[in-house]
Amino acid sequence: MSKEKINLNISGMTCVNCSNGIENFLKRQDGVIDTKVSFASSEGEFTIDSKLYSKDKLVANIEKLGYKVEDDFEKLEQEQIRSFQKLKQLFITSMSLTIVIFALMFSNIFEDELNKKIIFIFATIVQFYCGGRFYNLAYKALSNKNFDMNVLVALGTSAAYFYSVFVLFAPWLFPENLRFVYFDGAAVIISFILLGRYLEERSKQKASDFLKKLMNLAPQEANLIQEDGNIKTVLANSLEVGNKVLIKSGEKIPIDGKIIEGKADIDTSMITGESMPVFKELDDEVLSGTLNTNGVIKIEVLTKSKDTTLSKIIQLLKSAQSKQIPISRFADKVANIFVPSVIAIATLTFVVWSLLGDMQTAILASISVLIISCPCALGLATPIAIVSSVSRGAKEGLLIKNPEVLEIIKDIKYAVFDKTGTLTKGEISVETTDIDEKYFNTIASVEKLSEHPISKAIVSYIENKEAVENIEIEDVEIIAGKGIKAKVEGKLVLLGNEKLLSEHNISILDKHKKFYEEQLNKSNGAILASIDKETIGSFSLVDKLKDDAKELIANIKKRGITPILLTGDNKITASKIASKLDIKEVYSEVIPTQKYDVILKLQEKAKVMFVGDGINDAPSIKQADIGVTLNSGSDISKDAGDIILVNNELSSVEKSIKLSVESIKIIKQNLFWAFAYNSLGIPLAAGVLYPTFGLMLSPMYAGIAMSFSSVAVVLNSLRLKVKKF
């Protein structure tokens, strides 16, 4: 056996049953060892025995099923956009014509016969133009021995439509009391099912946006240092291992490398989640996509562009995006039993009544069976509840991007939290200081000349204490990784770390050293200040906990959920935050790939929710069973998340759990009633009770029963909007 793995981009899949159909078909082919097709990412991963089965044959078989295999991501994206626009246009056309049909049904604009013929024209457009995709998908499903919702939609709407056509154009075939048309029912079903597919496809489109944004994080060009020392602008993806690259202040690093000259403060928040820039100097490694906030450095390239840490994050995201959805497609599973049963019952009804010699009843009864089995309530059971749930979520500050997670939120056992910007405010601020306020004006005037986050925090703290008058500053020098020095009224002013003071032969006075060391032991940051060769004290810097963080952790613990802290910050800081929140399990100093691995290991035990806000959290957010992100987070993390906390309140996480419980309860009730109506109505329509009780549902009453079941489902779903929890 010669195993070969093949990855393909597949366009043309319109629902999860398309991916299932491809898998089922290919698994039956000799030489196909394994197949994984993701509807979410439009990708397929196949393992074949190349001696028995070739890639060309694989592509040919997929295209034989009616799908396309695209050469690259851009072509796939273009095809998806075209498909989405087509679906949107079909939905708008269908809904518009359905509204017109209803208006004509309940008005006397035209003479009755003309009115029905105009309705027939519009209904025909809806049935075969807008609803044509259901016939196509039903054919594909049946070809793969799969009875899904598409078969049910095509079958039910066809029964209602063609019965109406015969009533309209051959009324003599029916008794006068059975001459009713059901064009409106068929049109409504098609319009609402198209709405569900449109919303699903739109979510899928948005789900891939974060990948494109992430791909654009690293700069496309780099400053290559040539052998003669000249600088040449080249494409970043053309860099080779060993090349030397210049990165200026304010530029993003184009590739993973090692500093060979210079030093700088590097904003690594997208990779590590560190709230403060990290000082990097000779022989330190820097990562693609991180930002050089000050200083000029030269690096030696360590990896090719496809092997950078950022590229690995992108690959992890692709892998997480293409994971199989854990939700069971309950309606489709039941449909696989229900549809064949309905066809069998309708056929049996026709045969039995025919043998009894009543051909007219045979025709009407079998059609009534198909009409009452029309999946309007079944099709609405989940979408209407989801719409109500999403609406209620928005009211509660929850933007639910992927409604499918509502089914599994209630089952989570682990709630994993990022630290910076999620449990903490993500802003450096001054907690306290031992510096006399008489020096504040001088310090603020110097710090205003720096754009460093620490400088901004100190200026903000001082400005809240008193008005600052600008003083003339001389010889300002911002020293990467150390701080800032300047001359004020001829006196040397230093603001920075202990190393900066040591280089200028300044010792920390005992009265200031105690405060300074206390802050470090508490894992706070500390910035020393000296004027005229003598220390005047230090500022204690912190990233404060969010106001509702403690309450959330306590509440989820009561629900039996284990909170976990997962952060790129150092061990001391992470332990301090965890201690304040009473979180026992802590992972610190982890990069995105390690975060991703932690989520995978936890998922082997139970369902996992991940709450984060940074670019570095995106792979974990996407891989987790439920990914939650904050509205204040990066665009990429928001695109990757299933739920966005619009108001940035952590208490909304618990609200999502409560909403999940209520939503699933409503959906189950809806499905029960949808099937209950069918279970009771089908025997009546088939005429089972007619010999004994004289009871039998005509197509008209079958249509009414079908409509009533839909109304019941809608009203039950709307309870979510007002229910208290």
Image (tube, rainbow, N blue to C red):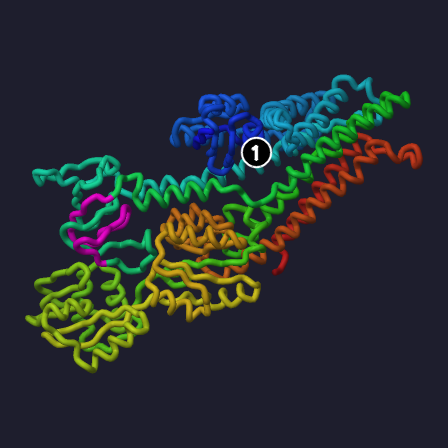
Residue that appears at 38% across and 48% down: 635
Whether residue 302 sits left or right of residue 54 in the image: it is left
Residue found farthest to the front:
1
Please state the horizontal and vertical placement of residue 48, each as a whole percent of the image: 48, 29
Up-down relation of residue 613 to residue 335 (above or below) = below
- Tell me if I can see residue 85 in this picture: no
Whether residue 712 sits left or right of residue 61 in the image: it is right
- Callout 1: few (<14), some (14-19), or many (20+) C-alpha neighbours within 10 Å? some
Whether the magenta-drawn stretch holds residue 284 is answered as: yes
Whether residue 542 sits left or right of residue 551 in the image: it is left
User: Foreground: 55 or 651?
Assistant: 55
Residue found farthest to the bottom:
511
Please state the horizontal and vertical placement of residue 8, each as a whole percent of the image: 44, 30
Q: Which region is colored magenta?
A: 279-302
Q: Image quadrant for the C terminus? A: bottom right
Please state the horizontal and vertical placement of residue 442, each as a whole percent of the image: 16, 71
Residue that appears at 24% across and 50% down: 286
User: Foreground: 169 or 301?
Assistant: 301
Displayed quadrant of residue 223: top left
Please state the horizontal and vertical placement of residue 579, each as a whole percent of the image: 42, 70
Give the residue pinned by disc 1: 20
Up-down relation of residue 533 to residue 175 (above or below) = below
Up-down relation of residue 45 to residue 446 (above or below) = above
